[in-house]
């Protein structure tokens, strides 16, 4: 069993299951940061990307609550109650 792990190189040494590589581990690390609330610049620096654009192009789908958060921030700033007046869609 140990030989099979050693034959897989760094992936095996890292304890990754068969079929997963270091790139998968890297993506996992980035998504943990994102879901933990890290902003684009923080993830960019942690991943070593040259610009935040590279980070966004790669991980934009992992900021799922970003739009909802911006709506909530604007609603709070404007004192919105969430109640839509009759006749307004």
Image (tube, rainbow, N blue to C red):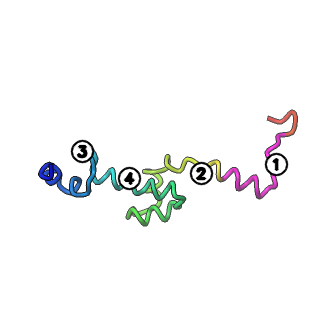
Mark 4–mark 1 contact, CB under 8 Å?
no
- CA gap, disc 3 and disc 4: 17 Å
Q: From the viewer's perspective, is residue 24 above or below residue 47?
A: above
Q: Quadrant of the C terminus?
A: top right
Q: Residue at x 64, y 48 (%)?
A: 68
Whether the magenta-drawn stretch holds residue 72 is answered as yes
Q: Residue at x 38, y 52 (%)?
A: 27
Q: How many marks?
A: 4
Residue that label 1 marks: 81
On the image, the x and y values in percent for residue 75 come to 75, 52
Where residue 48 is drawn, which disc sits there?
Answer: none
Residue that label 3 marks: 18
Query: Mark 3 or mark 4, which has the lower sequence index?
Result: 3
Mark nearest the camera among 3 and 2 is 3
Residue that label 4 marks: 27
The magenta-colored residue range is 70-84
Q: Residues within 10 Å of mark 3 (few under 14, many from 20)?
A: few
Q: Residues within 10 Å of mark 4 (few under 14, many from 20)?
A: some
Query: Mark 1 or mark 2, which has the lower sequence index?
Result: 2
Where residue 66 is drawn, which disc sits there?
Answer: 2
Query: Mark 4 or mark 1, which has the lower sequence index?
Result: 4
Mark nearest the camera among 1 and 2 is 1
Say whether residue 67 is left or right of residue 40.
right
Judge whether residue 54 can be spotted in this image: no
On the image, the x and y values in percent for residue 47 come to 39, 62
Q: Residue at x 44, y 56 (%)?
A: 55
Asked whether 40 or 4 is in front, the reply is: 4
């Amino acid at each position: 069993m140990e030989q099979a792990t050693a034959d897989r190189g760094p992936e095996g040494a890292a304890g990754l299951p068969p079929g997963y590589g270091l790139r998968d581990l890297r993506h996992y690390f980035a998504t943990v940061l994102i879901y933990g609330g890290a902003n684009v610049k923080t993830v960019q620096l942690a991943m070593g990307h040259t610009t935040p654009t590279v980070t966004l192009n790669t991980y934009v789908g992992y900021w799922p609550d970003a739009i909802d958060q911006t709506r909530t921030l604007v609603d709070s700033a404007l004192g919105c109650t969430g109640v839509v007046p009759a006749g307004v869609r």
